[in-house]
Every structure is written in C-alpha cells, then in structure tokens.
Image (spheres, rainbow, N blue to C red):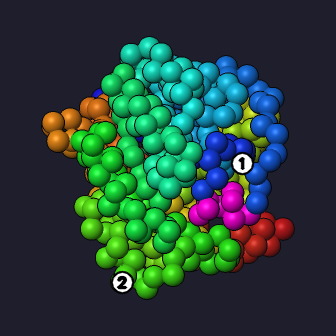
Amino acid sequence: MDKVVKFINVHVKMSNCTLRCHYCYVTIHKTFGHPIPQLQYSPSFIRQALNKKRLGGCCHLNFCADGETLLLPDLIDIVRELLEEGHYISIVTNATLTKKIEQITALPEHLKRHLFVKASYHYLELSNRNLINTFFENVNALHKSGISITIEITPNDELIPFVDEAVKICYDHTGAAPHFTLARDEHFKELPLLTKLSREEYRKTWGKFNSTLFDFKESIFGVPVKRFCYAGEWFLCLDLLSGDMSKCYGTPTIQNIYTDPEEPLKLEAIGKGCPRAHCFNGHSLIPMGVVPSIKSPTYAEERDRITTDGRHWLYPDIAAIFSQRLYDNNSQLPWYRRAYINHTSVLKPLKRLFSK
C-alpha cells in the first residue's frame, strides 16, 4: 500500500465561477469578472516539478480555486499527469460543469481509484439556477465511475429554513446526508464564524446531522494551535499558476518550484510559529497528521458516508490514504531541533552574529 509523505494544497488563483453564492469569499471581496487565466507551463512540466523523487514520495494534492476549479483550462490534463506520477488527487468543485465531469469520468480506471472529488452543495444557488438535478447527476456519475466523493454544505444563516429540505434531497439522490463545514466571515481579519447565531445556537443548528467533519471543525474553530506543527515540511501550499511555494496559508513564499525543477525543496517546519488565530484549514491538516500531538478523527472519517444501500462514498484506495497520518510516514524532529525552530526568531540572528 502507498504511504503518503506530504499533503499539498494546490491553489488555483482564479475567481471565475458558475455560481454566485452570497457567503462565498469571492462574492464578499467582489473579485468576479477577471479573465480565466492561461497556464504558462505544460501539464508534463508541472508533473516534472512535482515528481515523486523530488517530493520524497507519494503525496496527496488538493486542487482548489477561489472560484470554480474546473473552469481552469488543462486542469484535468494536469490531474492526469500527476495521477500517472503516482500521487493521490483531490478536486474541489461545485459539480455543475457536466462536460468537465464527463472528462473526469473518462479517465482510465486505475487512475480514478486515486481520485477524490469534494462536491460543494450550494443548495440555495443551485435551486435558484435550476441546477439541483444537474449537481446530483454529475456527483452520481463520478461515484458510479469509480471515483471517491464527498458532498459538503457550507452553513449560512439564510439556509436555515431550507436545510432539512436540502438534506432530504441529498438523501433521495445519494442515499446519505451531506457533510457540513464552517464558513468564515471574510469581512474581518480575525475570520470569525459567518453567522448571527451564538456559538451554542450555531452548534445546535448545524451539528444535528451526524457530520464528523462539522463536529471536529467546530471543536477547533477559534482555538490557536500551540503545539509543534510540521507545515512547511509535511504540508505545503503551492500556487499552481506561478509555482510559488509557501509553508502554509498566508505565509511568505519560500521557493518557486518551476524555476528549476531539479532543485531540492526547501523544507522547514513552522513549529509553534503559526501566525493565525486558529488553524486556517485544521479540519484537513490536523486529521492528516500535520500536528502530531493533537488528537482527531481521520480524514477518511470526516469525508466518508455509508449510503442506505451499504455503499461507501470513499472507495478502498482513497479510504486507505485518507486513514493515514503523516506523522506515521515521516520521521519527527528531535527535541533540540524543534526547540531551535520554535525560537528561530532569536536564534538565527545570534547564529549570524557568532558566525561573523
């Protein structure tokens, strides 16, 4: 069985979308309307830059745009190249682009076993655009073709009167309820919950659907990570268009991996130096094992559902990968190295001073 050694968020800087959800950060920041970007690098070149030898082994790569990920030209060709390289791929999509879904389901069977699609179920917007049936037809086509899936609702106050109806429709089409995430209010730097409800009301409203994803994400929301974090070593953020790599969300670029595809990656864990008030995507990073000392469900437990006829949303290959922890597949640093990283802002200047 493959062992995943890194989790990489592949960010597609593209705000174009087929929907206009009122709670989306693209809507909040009013960044719609830009031309769809064109890739400057070929899919085969991107595969070369992300080859298994350079990355240290098999990786889980998560593709997500600011808008709709599948609108990027050549995205499916890039995904195919990286699947053929031996990586496991996640794609975040609103599942409304039927022709793109058909291209994905046409991939070879052995590649689809290593592919996972997170279908964002934007019920109100899908209803307004008469796209509910399109959404579920595409999601079911993906799963029927052998691709692992999950269906996820973003809680928002306007959905509350309709949420039971939305869950029932999901049951009727797939045999299971959707999972629930949490929405951040992008109007504020602290990124609080996007709601007028109290925390207790929010928990009661959205926590009644037996979603492990919601339960864990809600439990860590607003809680700063004070433990040693291996983001920067086991987890990385990549700008797909430019090749800029950073340690984590919102941290400075440490390397451009396209400049020289032969150059080793510059890896160093962020340690206790996280600049955020709470882990930006802790529901992914912590279950994958980026912070070894924090207990959590596995990523598979957060994403899977068992349908009324006994099927799993996650097929065996993806379920096995999502059940792994990065701390089981990588060597952890000794205490003195962790201490140096935790106090690097003081120790690095001292080191330079003594070297002079």
- Disc with the residue nearer the chain's start (1 vs 2): 1
Taking the spot 59% from the left edge, 63% from the top edge, the residue there is: 23
Taking the spot 66% from the left edge, 44% from the top edge, the residue there is: 17
Taking the spot 43% from the left edge, 85% from the top edge, the residue there is: 198
- Is 47 magenta? The answer is no
Image disc number at residue 177? none
- Name the element at disc 2: helix
Q: Nearer the viewer, residue 137 or 104?
A: 137
Q: Position of residue 33 (x, y in %)?
A: 80, 47
Residue 10 occupies quadrant: top right
How would you rate the neighbour count of disc 2 (Cα within 10 Å): few for under 14, some for 14-19, many for 20 or more? few
Residue tagged by mark 1? 15
Residue 290, can we see it? no
Q: Amino acid at mark 1?
A: Ser
Q: Is 348 left or right of 76, judged from the image as shown?
A: right
What secondary structure is the stretch in magenta mostly built from? Answer: helix
Distance from Cα at disc 1 to Cα at disc 2: 33 Å
Residue 154, can we see it? yes
- Name the element at disc 1: loop
How would you rate the neighbour count of disc 1 (Cα within 10 Å): few for under 14, some for 14-19, many for 20 or more? many
| Bounds of the magenta segment | 22-29
Q: Nearer the viewer, residue 348 or 50?
A: 50
The quadrant the C terminus occupies is: bottom right
Q: Amino acid at mark 2?
A: Glu
Q: Position of residue 213 (x, y in %)?
A: 35, 59
Residue tagged by mark 2? 200
